[in-house]
Image (tube, rainbow, N blue to C red):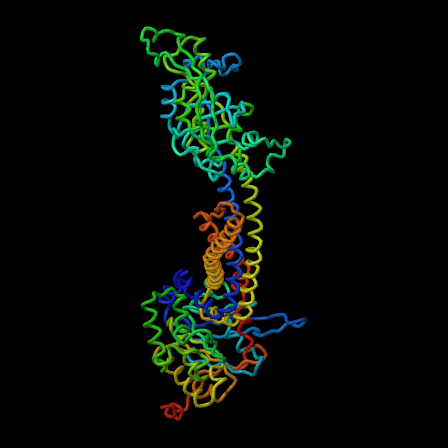
Amino acid sequence: MNLNSTQSNSPNGAPAIRIVDLCRHYQMGDTLIRAVDGVSLQIQPGEFVALLGSSGSGKSSLLNLIAGLDRPTSGAVIVDNHDLAQLSREDLAKHRLRTVGMVFQSFNLVSRMTLAENVDLPLRFAEVDRGQRQALTRDALERVGLGARMTHRPSELSGGEQQRAALARALINQPKLLLADEPTGNLDSRTGTEIMNFIREFNETLGMTIVMVTHERALAERYARRLIFLADGKLVDDRPNSIPVATQQGVQ
Amino acid sequence: MMKTYDLSELALRNLRESSLRNSLTTIGISVGVASLVAMLSLGIGLQKLATRHLAKSGLFDTVVVTSRREMRGFSRDDERSTASAAESRTLDEPARQEIEHLPEVLEAYPDIRFITELRYQNKPYLTMVSGIPDSARSNDAFAGIPGSFFSSETAPEVILQKSFAMELLGKTPPPGQEDDVPVNDLAKPLLGQELTMRYAQRLTAQSTSDPAQSDSDSSYSVISREQKLKIVGISDLDPDSMRGAAKARVFLPLKLAQDLRVMQPSDVRDSMRGFNKHPSYSTISVRVKNPKQVKAVEQAIKKLGFNTFSILDATRSLRQFFAVLDLFLGIFGSLALAVASIGIVNTLVMAILERRREIGIMKAIGASDGDVRKLFFAEAGAMGLLGGFVGVALGWAIGHIINLGTNIYLKRQALPPENFWAVPWWLVGAAIIFAFVVSLVSGLYPAARAARLDPVQALRYE
């Protein structure tokens, strides 16, 4: 399967993500956990969506299903015209490699590698040539202001810097979709703002579709254009959000 | 899927990261490979040593050639049929030269042996005397004996077999205890002493001064002669044991024996049968370049119309013995490698537990199951390869130290040094490949386990 060619062939009108009656149940001891329970929604290309809910509401599970890290119990997740439930493990890995970029609350950089090596890793998996890789890695790290920290290890950096490196890594294969799971959860408000400004920039200048999981409603309201509320695995509210102009000025 | 170069680079990088644990695992493999190499080198070395000694003994690379005429009375049917195909021939000088020019033949020399009287301190002793070629110098029976080998091919010198030396000194031990007498004790009173050999010299038709009789069938005379001989060496072994009852106990230089023209049994026969243009030999000893070619050379000589005799295929049972020995040594050597392979499994399983999160991250950013599997495979293979190289070097070093130590011991015991250690190139290659393959097999389970890891689970816990 060639994801790239199908991506370019996708009609403009098609949604970036289409979720149909999606369920993800799993057994924990004797009880059946319905992490995602019958969710249906569509996200258009270029949207900035926040998934909101308390812990255990299923927002992270939903994100993992979109990311192709997990498989649904039933229903469909169609990203770029591919139903992830139907993909082989191999093709699901390609989906994660080329179609989505992910950032996590805990940054998830490989602690034993330098920043450059971390950012380089997806390029290795994508079989990009060595010479090309070096330039791409440097560009990506410079873009997030870490050009001088290429040979540092994650433990030598602040949380904000680590998350910026994670952003550089998420963007390195130029995915259409950025999935962020509580990206500011481990950061103070100043560095959190810094990260959110990068994400918004990617959304606005690169036209990336952003799906961000957060439990901070204020944060979601400041950046996302659409708020989706989950509770007990079910979609409870889905509404557009108008971003206050003050926020946009405030970050300059 | 990652490119091979990127994969190996990443694998090596990961190995360097927890260098202590991976070094210990690699050392484990090295020790396993070293023990395997050491054991097999010992087996191969011992085999080479034994083959070398057998070759030096002259027993297994020698073909004894006799004329068919002599054997006519009791030759078997199959030989009779070949005898009719090839002309039954005289074993004379042209025949000897023809045999010597056969491929794979090192030399062919007439077997000169006769029973005669030797006088030592005016007492007569009757024994079999045999001429030996200069090439026997390196034979185990003559190398390193008390005294020396003949100073030249025609020197009037003799080497005595130990039992004859004992007889000369009047020290005949009870049968079966000959070995208990040290040969050096016999050499002291005998070396440099003189023996007088009394023998019958034959004057052939060609050598008589009367040309009128040169074509005559039966004209030659026998003259009784004496030759003084100096004892130059005592041989501990029995170099002529192949001859059984006809074995000689006194040895002369072959050239000297030929020059003396001692009358031999075949001469009498020649005169009775009536052909003697050339003096014929009763037997010719043929030395073959390689014991393996004995059979082929025998066939070739038989085609020329002679009978042959050899101790065939003694080396085959020897090879069989060493194949079994090598197998056992190999099994013992491999035990250490088996233990080391469990070490690889352990190290990699530990690495999976420790790098659980890392594997989850790699999968989340796009690594396929195959990438993860290959990465762990490469790490196992790299440890195996490195361990193989270090192990071969280590095994080689251990072997050399053992060889050195044993030779120091041999020297103290006044024995000649021996090299019973051999590391052939195929063993080096095979050991490294074996270590590599064993490591890959050890990596199978951990790699599969790492590949199956669920990224959501792996990333769940901080």
Dividing the picture into quadrants, the one containing residue B149 is: top left
B354 left or right of A100? right
Q: Position of residue B353 (x, y in %)?
A: 56, 69
Compared with residue A213, is residue B243 higher up or lower down, i.e. above or below? above
Residue B393: percent from left, percent from top: 46, 56
Q: Residue at x 33, y 72 (%)?
A: A136
Comparing B155 with B409, the one in front is B155
Q: Quadrant of the N terminus of chain B?
A: bottom left
| Residue A241 in the image, given as x and y percentages of width and height | 44, 86
Dividing the picture into quarters, in which one does residue B228 lie? Answer: top left
Where is A205 relative to B358, above or below?
Answer: below
Query: Looking at the image, which is closer to me, B150 or B199?
Result: B199
Total labels drawn: 0
Q: Residue furthest front?
A: B122
Vertical comparison of B293 with B417: above or below: above
* Closer to us: A79 or B51: B51
- Horizontal side of A201 relative to B460 (left or right) equals left
Q: Residue furthest right?
A: A30
Q: Nearer the viewer, residue B281 or A121?
A: B281
Residue B142 at x, y = what percent? 47, 35
Would residue A87 be seen by someone viewing this image from the given angle?
A: no
Q: Residue at x 57, y 49 (%)?
A: B331
Q: Quadrant of the C terminus of chain B?
A: bottom right
Q: Is residue A102 visible?
A: yes
